Image (cartoon, grey):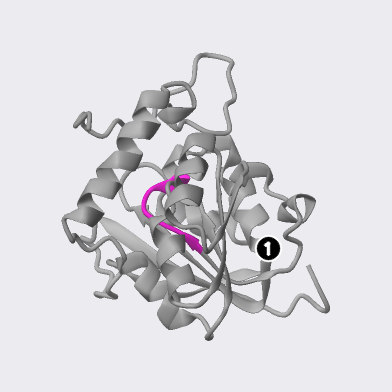
């Protein structure tokens, strides 16, 4: 494995408006490194499933769940093994290919969260819950982040939930998430500092937000 360090999103060129800063779209070796990194961690028995354990706690049994920005599928794959019906979506085809190889019990699709329309890919049924793990939102272009929140919200059934992880001081922040919520039908239900639900404090550097979809009056 190429044990290169994690690379932060690259700023777009002047005048460019990319929907994603994910480096693997241009550097396929980065995607391969990223996939092998988590495969190696799994082989070594490291705990990679804190996020999916929280989603499993929130979800009804045999729920329909969306892993948004799924990468190579470690979260969605775990949820599928727990008996949930999982759809994962990522903008990087190489990561989706790895997810299909490692976690065949879930459905893995290539898609852009900023314009997501899973009905067009044969997955029109709304979801009981959506997971947006780690720093997924950081890799979406700044001008498209609110649109991505709205597109994900449109895939949540009434009374369903969405869980979003983000850093507090840089990238996509809790304040940016809150500003994107009006008009989506989602409201903030809980906010924690970690995936194992430690209290969110003024000094916290990470935030886990649990959002709830209200009644949309008969549909999406």
Whether residue 10 is visible to the viewer of this picture, yes or no, is no
Whether residue 177 is visible to the viewer of this picture, yes or no, is yes
Q: Is 132 part of what is drawn in magenta?
A: yes
Q: Nearer the viewer, residue 18 or 98?
A: 98
Percent x, y of residue 99: 46, 49
Q: Is 110 part of what is drawn in magenta?
A: no
Percent x, y of residue 67: 51, 59
Q: Residue at x 59, y 54 (%)?
A: 149
Q: Nearer the viewer, residue 198 or 53?
A: 53
Q: Which residues are magenta?
A: 131-137
Helix, strand or loop for disc 1: loop
Q: Residue furthest top?
A: 14
- Horizontal side, residue 199 vs residue 93: left or right: left
Image quarter in which the C terminus is found: bottom right
Percent x, y of residue 7: 29, 30
- Horizontal side, residue 218 vs residue 131: left or right: right
Q: Residue furthest right?
A: 218
Q: Residue at x 25, y 64 (%)?
A: 202
Residue 43 in the image: above or below residue 128: above
Q: Which residue is mark 1?
A: 155
Q: Residue at x 31, y 65 (%)?
A: 49
Percent x, y of residue 150: 65, 55
Residue 170 in the image: above or below residue 1: below
Q: Residue at x 51, y 39 (%)?
A: 140
- Horizontal side, residue 186 vs residue 210: left or right: right
Residue 1 in the image: above or below residue 169: above
- Horizontal side, residue 154 vs residue 172: left or right: right
């Amino acid at each position: 494995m190429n044990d290169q360090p994690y690379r932060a999103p690259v700023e777009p060129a002047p005048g460019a408006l990319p929907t994603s800063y994910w480096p693997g779209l241009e550097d396929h070796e980065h995607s391969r490194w990223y996939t092998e990194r988590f495969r190696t961690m799994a082989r070594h028995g490291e705990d990679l499933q804190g996020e999916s354990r929280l989603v499993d706690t929130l979800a009804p049994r045999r729920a329909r769940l969306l892993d948004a920005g799924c990468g190579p599928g470690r979260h969605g794959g775990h949820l599928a093994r727990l008996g949930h019906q999982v759809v994962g979506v990522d903008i990087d085809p190489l990561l989706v290919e790895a997810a299909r190889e490692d976690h065949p019990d879930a459905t893995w699709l290539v898609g852009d969260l900023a314009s997501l329309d899973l009905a067009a890919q044969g997955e029109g049924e709304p979801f009981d819950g959506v997971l947006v793990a780690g720093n997924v939102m950081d890799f979406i272009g700044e001008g498209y982040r609110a649109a991505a929140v709205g597109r994900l919200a449109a895939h949540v059934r009434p009374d369903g939930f969405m869980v979003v992880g983000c850093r507090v001081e840089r990238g996509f922040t809790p304040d940016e998430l809150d500003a994107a919520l009006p008009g989506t039908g989602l409201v903030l239900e809980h906010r924690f500092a970690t995936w194992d639900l430690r209290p969110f404090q003024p000094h916290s550097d990470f935030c886990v937000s649990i959002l709830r979809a209200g009644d949309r009056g008969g549909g999406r």
